[in-house]
Image (cartoon, rainbow, N blue to C red):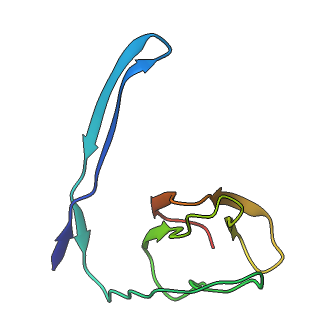
Amino acid sequence: MATLTPTLTLASSDMNGDTLNLSVTDSLSILGQVTTKQVVTSVTAAVFAANGGYTKSYVYLKNLSATEAEIIYIRTATGGTDVMDLGAGEWLFSHGLVM
């Protein structure tokens, strides 16, 4: 069994005139198969994580582009509803991302 420790820290000294300092850490047990992949996309939709026979998933995505107009749209299925989008340099870590 492997353990994954995600940590999220949000900090700002000048947001809305208040100081923000929030940090959350968790410990996740990885019991099954681990799959990693890097996908290069274009203007054509690409399926990079199809529904599978698993009970739990953790997904990390990052838009490596530095071009502001290059946005990754995450959808429920090809042609489906947009769940979220990632602009240049943005990332996401999610448990139970609906694909």
Residue 42 drawn at (x, y percent): 70, 83
Say whether residue 46 is left or right of residue 10: right
Q: Residue furthest right?
A: 79
The residue closer to the viewer here, 64 or 75, is: 64
Q: Residue at x 64, y 84 (%)?
A: 41
Dividing the image into 4 quarters, which one contains the C terminus?
bottom right
Q: Residue at x 40, y 12 (%)?
A: 18
The residue closer to the viewer here, 51 or 82, is: 82
Tell me which corner region of the image, top left, top right, bottom left or bottom right, holds residue 31: bottom left
Tell me which corner region of the image, top left, top right, bottom left or bottom right, holds residue 3: bottom left
**Residue 96 position (above or below residue 49):** above
Say whether residue 99 is left or right of residue 10: right
**Residue 83 position (above or below residue 80):** above
The residue closer to the viewer here, 46 or 54, is: 46
Residue 37 drawn at (x, y percent): 43, 88
Dividing the image into 4 quarters, which one contains the N terminus?
bottom left
Q: Residue furthest front?
A: 67
